[in-house]
Amino acid sequence: MMHRTALPSPPVAKRVQTRREHHGDVFVDPYEWLRDKDSPEVIAYLEAENDYTERTTAHLEPLRQKIFHEIKARTKETDLSVPTRRGNWWYYARTFEGKQYGVHCRCPVTDPDDWNPPEFDERTEIPGEQLLLDENVEADGHDFFALGAASVSLDDNLLAYSVDVVGDERYTLRFKDLRTGEQYPDEIAGIGAGVTWAADNAHCLLHHRGRGLASGHSVAIPTRVRRIVGAGLPRSR
């Protein structure tokens, strides 16, 4: 364990008085400058904070590993969620041992009158199972990955899903033809996480995260837009 006298000195953020006024209320923030995530000075300060944390908590690494493996031992890595029915399909997600992300699947309904979720064995093959989206494939080659939303058109033929591979919560919308497995090359970048299909199976509703300025910094502003999807995926606002 690191002795108290051996602790390194923590980095100290400089104070730059920044005045903001909204609706008659004045607020002075000495750390407003830290909002500029692209600033070399901000990045250097954050790296110093990370280095300080790693050095002062290095003695806890054995305990962290012990707790991690205890939790992992109690986690069922190969698992299957409770199926949810929509129309003629049961939708569910799978997880597999050793895989970091989930896999989204569906299988056909065998009895149209039975709405009770089927009890599947996560280790056996499910008749008619169709893989919709493998997050592990989408995440491959990226240091960060997050799935925002996955929406199937009402005619069951198209999948629209959003992914963030940077960590700035600006998602990219992608499309897949579930009849052929074809991944469309068309993408819509800079959107919010959510997306849903319109009832005509030809349009998607989403939030486009445009950029505005606040206190001299770039911010995301959600705006509702409508994008058309059809043969060749032409786009219109």
Image: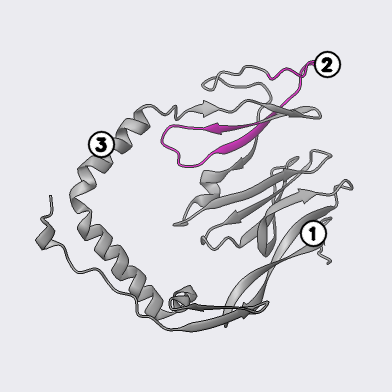
Instruction: Give the amino acid type for the residue marked by disc 2 in the picture.
Output: Asp
Q: Main secondary structure of the magenta part?
A: loop
Q: Is residue 95 above or below residue 18?
A: above
Instruction: Give the amino acid type for the residue marked by disc 1 in the picture.
Output: Leu
The answer, for residue 214, to whether it is visible in the render is no
The circle drawn on residue 2 is none
The image's colour scheme reads one colour
Q: Quadrant of residue 127?
A: top right
Badge 3 or badge 2: first in the primary sequence: 3
Secondary structure, mark 3, is: helix
Instruction: Give the amino acid type for the residue marked by disc 3 in the picture.
Output: Lys
Crowd around label 1: few <14 · some 14–19 · many ≥20 (10 Å): some
- Magenta span includes 14: no
- Magenta span includes 102: yes
Of the residues tagged 2 and 1, which is closer to the observer? 2
Residue 157 at what x, y percent from top left? 79, 41
Measure the alpha-carbon separation of dots 3 and 1.
50 Å
Q: Is residue 4 above or below residue 18?
A: above
Q: Name the residue carrying label 3.
A: 66
Residue 228 at what x, y percent from top left? 83, 59
32 or 184, nearer to the observer: 32
Q: Name the residue carrying label 1.
A: 233
Query: Are the residues at dot 3 and dot 1 in contact (C-beta closer than 8 Å)?
Result: no
Left or right relative to 69: residue 158: right
Secondary structure, mark 1, is: loop
Q: Over which residues does the magenta segment extend?
A: 92-117
Disc tally is: 3
Left or right relative to 22: residue 152: right
Measure the alpha-carbon separation of dots 3 and 2.
49 Å
